[in-house]
Image: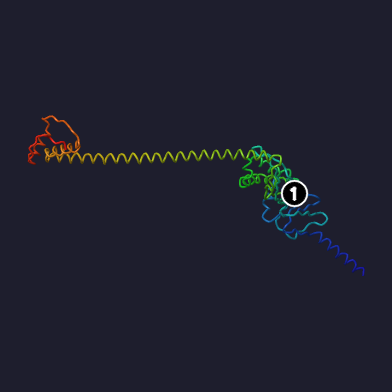
């Protein structure tokens, strides 16, 4: 019976020793192993071993063992302790705060951040708890948002694309500090709420109205400028068309006048006396119904006398019609 009792005690002690020698790191956890309070090993998330090794390269923790293998691990009972931290993303939400934009507009903002423990060794040494991590968000991440708001004009601040591009640039610089100093990686930062202080609504409305009027006046001026340019182009085209038409008409008229002159010249060269006769007949037509006095030596009488003789007339008085 004594031997059985001793064996049972030994088995219990062995089980206790074995249970004290193993620990399990789940997939959503990271862990730190300490020997008498000094960090000797860490378990990190898969693929982040190189990041942690580089982060610890110039510190007192440069020679600790780093592995990204989760699951069952062993430790020295009673001499080594293990501290685990969640590797899940944690959410930080700030208190509302009034800030100024670059053009001195006051707005009230509330920001958020998504972060997680990426380097458990640095986190264990500096931060330790989630509440302390949130305090780091207040001290380091929150000012980043405020500085970003201070750099933007009021209208740009409410342009989501402009704000996100600026925060992305700030986030890169922020993570360089957060990983190195606290072992925390910030995956996302942003503003969850934007409101106007009630005391500033009337001032904001007035400024927005002035900006709208300014933009409207500028748009009208640009429209007038475009309209005047279009009118000038149309007038220039019209003048060009008219000039071309006048030039073509002048050429046509010159050709017609030349043709008429040629026709007259040809007619004159055929029978000049007939041309004179026709011309005088036109004169008679034009003076029809009128009384005129002609010198007896006027060549017209010779034509009239010839006509009378041909008609058998005996009078020598010149007719008026």
Which residue is the site of mark 1? 123
Judge by depth and name the residue closer to the eye, 307 or 260.
Answer: 307
Residue 50 image position (x, y, % from top left): 67, 52
Above or below residue 40? Residue 106 is above
Left or right: residue 87 compared with residue 252: right
Left or right: residue 184 compared with residue 268: right
Quarter that holds the N terminus = bottom right
- Residue beneath the point at 74% across and 54% down: 86
The secondary element bearing badge 1 is classed as helix
Left or right: residue 50 compared with residue 85: left
Residue 116 image position (x, y, % from top left): 71, 51
Above or below residue 87? Residue 311 is above
The part of the image, by quadrant, that contains residue 211 is: top right
Residue 299 image position (x, y, % from top left): 11, 33
Quarter that holds the C terminus = top left
The part of the image, by quadrant, that contains residue 5 is: bottom right
Residue 76 image position (x, y, % from top left): 80, 56
Task: Categorize mark 1 by other alpha carbons within 10 Å: few (<14), some (14-19), many (20+).
Answer: many
- Residue beneath the point at 7% across and 37% down: 314
């Amino acid at each position: 019976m004594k031997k059985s009792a001793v064996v049972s005690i030994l088995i219990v002690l062995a089980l206790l020793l074995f249970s004290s020698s193993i620990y399990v790191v789940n997939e959503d956890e990271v862990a730190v192993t300490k020997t008498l309070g000094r960090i000797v090993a860490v378990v990190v998330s898969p693929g982040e071993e190189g990041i942690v090794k580089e982060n610890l390269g110039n510190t007192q923790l440069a020679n600790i063992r780093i592995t990204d293998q989760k699951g069952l691990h062993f430790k020295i009972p009673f001499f080594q302790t293990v501290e685990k931290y969640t590797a899940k993303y944690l959410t930080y939400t700030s208190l509302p705060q009034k800030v100024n934009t670059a053009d001195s507009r006051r707005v009230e903002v509330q920001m958020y951040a998504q972060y997680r423990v990426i380097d458990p060794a640095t986190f264990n040494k500096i931060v330790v708890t989630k509440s302390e991590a949130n305090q780091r968000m207040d001290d380091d991440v929150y000012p980043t948002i405020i500085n970003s708001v201070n750099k933007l004009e009021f209208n740009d601040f409410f342009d989501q694309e402009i704000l996100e591009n600026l925060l992305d640039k700030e986030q890169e610089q922020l993570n360089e500090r957060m990983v190195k100093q606290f072992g925390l990686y910030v995956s996302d930062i942003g503003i969850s709420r934007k409101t106007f202080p009630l005391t500033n609504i009337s001032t904001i409305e007035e400024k927005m109205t002035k900006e709208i009027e300014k933009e409207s006046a500028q748009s009208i001026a640009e429209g007038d400028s475009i309209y005047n340019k279009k009118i000038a182009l149309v007038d220039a085209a019209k003048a060009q068309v008219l000039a071309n038409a006048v030039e073509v008409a002048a050429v046509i008229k010159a050709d017609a006048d030349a043709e008429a002159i040629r026709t007259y010249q040809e007619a004159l060269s055929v029978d000049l006396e007939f041309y004179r006769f026709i011309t005088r007949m036109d004169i008679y037509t034009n003076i029809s119904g009128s009384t005129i006095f002609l010198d007896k030596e006027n060549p017209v009488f010779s034509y009239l006398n010839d006509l009378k003789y041909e008609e058998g007339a005996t009078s020598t008085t010149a007719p008026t019609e």
